[in-house]
Structures are given as C-alpha cells and as structure tokens.
Image (cartoon, rainbow, N blue to C red):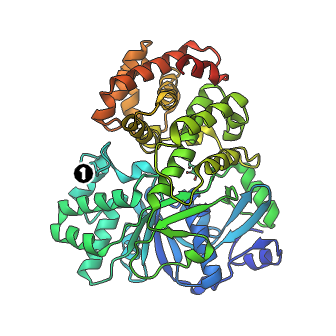
Amino acid sequence: MNLSNNTVNDIAKNAAIVTPQYDRDNTKIGIVHLGPGAFHRAHQAVYTENAMNVAGGNWGICGVSLRSATARDVLAAQDNLYTLAILDTAINYQVIGALKEVLVASEQSPQVIARLVSPDTKLVTLTITEKGYCLGADGRLDLTHDDIINDLASPSQPSSAIGYIVHALKQRKASAIEAFNVLSCDNVSGNGDKLRRAVIDYAAQIDTHLAAWIQTHVAFPNAMVDSITPKTEDYTIDSVSKAIGARDEWPIQREQFTQWVIEDNWQGARPAWDKVGVIFTSDVDGFEKAKLRLLNCLHSTLAYAGSLAGFETVFDVTNDDAFYQFICRLANDEVIGSFIPPKELDVEAYSKEIIARFLNPEIRHLLSQIAWDGSQKIQMRVLPIIADNIALGRSTKLLSLSLACWFEFICRALKESRDIVDPLAEQLINNSALRSNDCGEVVDAFLAIESIFSAELAHNSDLRSQLVNSLTALRNTTNITDINLVVEKLC
Ligand code: CS2
C-alpha cells in the first residue's frame, strides 16, 4: 500500500499517527515556497500543517524547485503527502498534507508565475540556502552573479529566486493585486533585511518605480529557524514505511526540537503559527545570532575538523571526549560574549542544550552534508564572530582553528581529487596555491577570495598569523582525532 489520498484514512486508524485534521481537498494554496527541500518539509511545512490542524485557513503550500524535478516527481506519486519522523527520546510520526503542489521552475515557469501572482498567494517563503541569495561578501546583491546577469537580461523569464519574486511583484503591482509577504527561512544573518535589500537592488535595475513600490508595500520579516534535519536515507524510507503501514518514498527525519522566531513585521493575514509555537518578536537579531553562532558555527567546525579526523556523523564526533571539550571551549571562550543575546535567553543553558542535541543517538547527521557550501556558510557562521571578537578585543584563536579546518578540508579534497560541493568549487579547484605545502601561501590564497573575505579581515595581520599557525598545527599533527593536541599548540 502506498501513501496517498486513498490510503491516508487507513493510516489515520492508527491513533499514534497524526494525519491532516483539516479539509485538505478544499484548502487553497496561500503560500509559495521556493526550495522545498528536507528542511522546509520538516520545519515550515510542519508548523503550517499544525496551524491548519488547529485553526484551518487557506495555507496550502506550492513548493517550487528552481531546478531539480526529483521532489515534484516523487511526491506527486503520493499526492504530495509525506511523513515526518521525529526521532528522539520518543519516536513519533505525522503525515503532512500542507504541501499541495510541487512545481519545477525550469520546466513550469508560467505555472510558477501564475501561483506567485495569484491573489490567493499571501506569502512567499524561501529555503534556497545561503548561495541562493546571490550576495557578495558585503551582504549586498552581487550584480556580477551569472544568475542575476541572466535574469536582468530577460526579467520576464527569470531563473533565480530574486528574479521570480521581482517579476511576480511587477505583475501584482500592474494588476493592482496586493503584494505578498516574503519570508526567508535560511541560515542567513539578517535574512529578511538582506533579501529585501537584494530584491530592491534587483528591481531598481529594471524599474525604479517598482523598486519604490516594493519598498513600501512588501514586508520582509527577519527570522530564525532551527530543527536538525538530516537528509532522508534509504533506511529512513524503509523504517517509516513500516511504521505507518504504507510506502512513503520521501519521508523526512528530524529531531524533536524545533524553533521558529519571526520578526513581527507583517502585512495582512498569516497562518495561525503563533498557536503552534512560533515566536513573533521585534528582537529576532539576538535569537538569530545565538542560533547561527552557537549551533551552526559549532556544526561547521565539527563538519571540517571531524572529517579531517575521520569521523562520519555529528553524534560520533561530539561523543568523542576531545572534540566535546573542544566545542565546549569554543562556545564558552569565543562565541558566548561575541553578541548580545535576547534578554530572555539563558545563553549558557542554550549552548549546553545545543551540544546535547548533537548527542541525539537517533539522529544520523552526516558531517559531509553539513560540510557542503562551506564558502557560503562560513560567511554567516564563523567570519562575523571573528570580526566581532576582533572589534571587541576578544580571542579568535579557536575560531581561527575552525576556519583553518575548512581550509585544510578543501586542500585535502583538492590533493585527493575528491568532489567539493560548493558554489565556488571551480574557483577553488583552479586555484593552484591551495595545493601548496606552504601554509602561508595557502592562507593568503584563501584570504584573497574577495567574495568570501572582506578587506578588513583579509588584511588583518594577527588573523593571518593565527590562521597560518592553525593550519601548520593541523598539518604537523599526525592524528587529529585528539584535536586538543592541536589546540594546545595554539592556546
Ligand atoms: C546544518 C544546518 O547543514 C548544515 O549546515 O548546520 O542545516 C543545521 O542542521 C540547522 O541549521 C539546524 O537548525
């Protein structure tokens, strides 16, 4: 039996499995989501499902994959239903119906634009990963980005998320259709502000009146999102299908913990998210910095340092005492204190809870997955902490080691001719200095990448020295599994 509209009622007979409690067939699409990957389906779609379960509303989701057809084709075969598997101290399953349609922009652009322009669409959300925003090291739209150049050359046939958003808003303005809200759900610091600036900068290249209209009519709330969501593996499909009694070809696995903090800057209606745990506040920045710096910085540090030491998962590397001590010291000595947390947040307890979440034995989170797109992620997770600590006169030694681990992770991949999953992969591959045995030459080559490092960081001699010392220590330590041997050389 396959998961579908025809079998979901049979599944519902198992009281342990939550299924859609609203009239899914008659629920209209009110949200268009760009990038319906695992995290969207584990996080925003679940909050929206739960909001409709308690309060109804026409908040069905149209997922738009910008390029890949896999999600559309796999989910269409099961009426876009899928199972959320919460793997934690308790195991729970919920069939999610909020995703009503999946389109592929590169194949179905007219349908995508029609959805975006429809008056029923009140909200556009995004999980397009850091690279999808086409930003430069300064956090502004990179007008030299290939996707942006292509879209500006033919604005009515966009390919980028920003191109689609602006083209749809242009149509809505022309037809006197109220603008939608635009909500980034990516791990980008100041995600709403940066997206707003990028959309307006892009629109201004086409039509300054449109840019002005967007400035005054479109809300771009900042938001912090959090729930550890490893990619679906074959064992996930088998175990979930067995648990629900029906074949689900693309279930989503996630930890119990989930959090969504959204800036209370909104035009018109929204799903009853506040009734299902979403926090609306004026101070998103503190929550966002706390999460990006105390979870994502440690995640990326473990991804690179742990991979160099031969570990495979977050659990494995965090369960190693030397690495456990290392990330606790990184958090306590160099991350906490680098930002002003929300007044209601006990930041030490929050940090301890995050590291405890890394030790969830039910979650198999591959370091290799977290290691993707390092050139983009370090700009949100590591470099801002380094910059703030330099300005505050605080230590950056362990953060430099974290950054050097990414350097060495890339250098080893190049030397061993392994794939590099990163939007700058070609640039890294073609940079012969990254294959050098001279640590100073390698560090200078990385710091010279202007799309990653601001001039301020690239020309900081103390930072450069710390990076050279860290890379040297990494290369002179035969067995990095005892990361503290490396740390002792530096601190
Ligand atoms: C991870 C994040 O893959 C990664 O880069 O650090 O996806 C992380 O799991 C989430 O931000 C947790 O909320």
Residue 444: give x, y in percent of width and height: 35, 22
Residue 203: give x, y in percent of width and height: 23, 63
Which residue sits at x=68%, y=63%?
Answer: 84
Quarter assignment of residue 323: top right
Q: Which amino acid, mark 1?
A: Ile
Does any portion of residue 98 appear in the rendered image?
no
419 left or right, relative to 89:
left
Which residue sits at x=48%, y=51%?
Answer: 289
Residue 486: give x, y in percent of width and height: 58, 20
Where 437 sits versus 230, above or below?
Answer: above
**Label 1 C-beta lies within 8 Å of the nearest ligand 1 atom:** no
127 left or right, relative to 195:
right
Q: Quadrant of the N terminus?
A: bottom right
Q: Quadrant of the C terminus?
A: top right
Depth check: give the residue in front, 38 or 250. Answer: 38
Q: Residues within 10 Å of mark 1 (few under 14, many from 20)?
A: few
Which residue sits at x=41%, y=57%?
Answer: 191
Depth check: give the residue in front, 387 or 115. Answer: 387
Where 418 sits versus 49, above or below?
Answer: above
Residue 337: give x, y in percent of width and height: 50, 43
Residue extending farthest to the left is 208
Quarter assignment of residue 478: top right
**SS label for mark 1:** helix
Count the numbered circles shown. 1
Does any portion of residue 57 appear in the rendered image?
yes
Q: Label 1 belongs to which residue?
A: 149
Which residue sits at x=49%, y=34%?
Answer: 420
